[in-house]
Image (cartoon, rainbow, N blue to C red):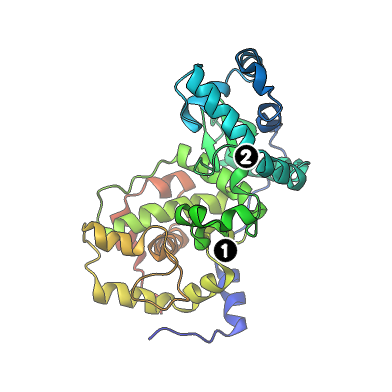
């Protein structure tokens, strides 16, 4: 039976038990400068696009092609592409203006990214930290993208959870509220570091049984624990505070429900989709539960395994097969 009343002292105990001393990274030098591609893009003279686009490419040679071909998915410089660019600049001008007001100064982001990159370099000294660039594209474009040269941050996905455009019926079809409520400032650094984490340790869950996929997905959160140790778990998971509280209070009940109702070694897509992936809540559980509960459970299993294997490095834990993590963790939450 799932619980609803949560003693406040429980969270203090959980927070303390999961807290691990973070390393001192203040001595690690990283240079973070944020380039503003969107400012140059929306200043283009649309009456002279051939020359303007050439100038834009000359200014941002390593990002221009990625933006045009991969993000906007334009084939090249032709009449149709010019028309689409004019339409985007015109249609998205109000969005650009609103975002400029909100993010005119990004010193705070520079500081947060510097801290995150220092932790990345601490754990992965050989990793090449990318340059950082911001952009605004169509709303279906990603909020964070990693290219060979840049970490790109799509500001169109961080205009604020109450931004009127996100409430448009068509946009809600693409991004329902349980997703668009995360399109806010506090998620920007986390999404950026998730992109770095996925580059360092790509997802290895495809085709695996449910329990192994849960743990492989949980590795992403475990990596974020090390890259952004001071960020709240609700931001890392994307849960609301209420959903996270529910998950912590009902961890034992959730695990009991899954093991009773599912074969945890199932590879059936509909079973896996129930517990892994975006949804407003987990099917079969109260509406106060979060979606993607499987990744959270997988994260908790890894944390328990790591607590028992203090001699293992972060890299060794991530490299440990999911089945081995599960079996040796002896995960039995109450």
Quick one: label 2, few (<14), some, or many (20+) residues within 10 Å? some
Disc 1 secondary structure class = helix
What x and y, as percent, mark residue 295? Answer: 41, 60
Q: Is residue 187 visible?
A: yes
Q: Which residue is mark 1?
A: 234
Q: Is residue 25 visible?
A: no
Circle 1 or circle 2, nearest the eye: 2
Above or below, 62 against 1 in this view is above
Above or below, 43 against 326 in this view is above
Q: Quadrant of residue 110?
A: top right
Above or below, 328 against 5 in this view is above
Q: Which residue is mark 2?
A: 92
Tag count? 2
Looking at the image, residue 294 sits to the left or right of residue 30; the answer is left
Q: Residue at x 49, y 16 (%)?
A: 78
What x and y, as percent, mark residue 54? Answer: 62, 13
Q: Residue at x 59, y 76 (%)?
A: 11
Q: Quadrant of the C terminus?
A: bottom left
Q: Residue at x 61, y 44 (%)?
A: 156
């Amino acid at each position: 039976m799932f619980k609803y009343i949560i003693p406040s002292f429980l969270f203090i105990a959980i927070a303390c038990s999961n807290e691990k001393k973070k390393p001192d990274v203040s001595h690690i030098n990283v240079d973070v400068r944020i380039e503003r591609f969107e400012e140059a893009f929306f200043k283009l003279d649309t009456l002279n696009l051939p020359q303007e686009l050439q100038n834009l490419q000359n200014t941002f040679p390593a990002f221009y092609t990625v933006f045009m071909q991969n993000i906007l998915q334009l084939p090249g410089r032709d009449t149709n592409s010019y028309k689409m660019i004019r339409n985007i600049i015109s249609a998205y001008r109000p969005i650009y203006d609103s975002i400029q007001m909100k993010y005119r100064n990004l010193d705070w982001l520079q500081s947060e990214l510097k801290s995150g990159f220092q932790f990345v370099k601490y754990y992965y000294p050989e990793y090449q930290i990318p340059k950082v660039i911001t952009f605004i594209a169509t709303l279906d474009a990603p909020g964070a993208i990693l290219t060979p040269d840049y970490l790109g941050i799509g500001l169109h996905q961080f205009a604020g959870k109450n931004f009127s455009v996100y409430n448009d019926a068509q946009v809600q079809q693409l991004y329902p509220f349980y997703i668009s409520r995360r399109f806010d400032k506090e998620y920007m650094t986390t999404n950026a570091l998730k992109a770095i984490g996925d580059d360092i340790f790509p997802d290895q869950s495809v085709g695996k049984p449910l329990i192994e996929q849960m743990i492989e997905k949980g590795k992403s959160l475990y990596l974020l624990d090390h890259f952004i140790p001071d960020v709240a778990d609700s931001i890392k998971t994307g849960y609301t505070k209420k959903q996270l509280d529910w998950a912590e209070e009902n961890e034992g009940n959730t695990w009991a429900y899954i093991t009773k109702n599912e074969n945890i070694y199932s590879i059936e897509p509909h079973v896996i989709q129930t517990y892994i992936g975006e949804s407003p809540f987990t099917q079969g559980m109260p509406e106060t539960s979060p979606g993607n509960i499987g990744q959270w459970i997988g994260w908790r299993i890894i944390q328990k395994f790591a607590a028992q294997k203090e001699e293992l490095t972060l890299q060794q834990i991530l490299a440990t097969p999911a089945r081995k993590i599960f079996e040796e963790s002896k995960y039995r939450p109450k």
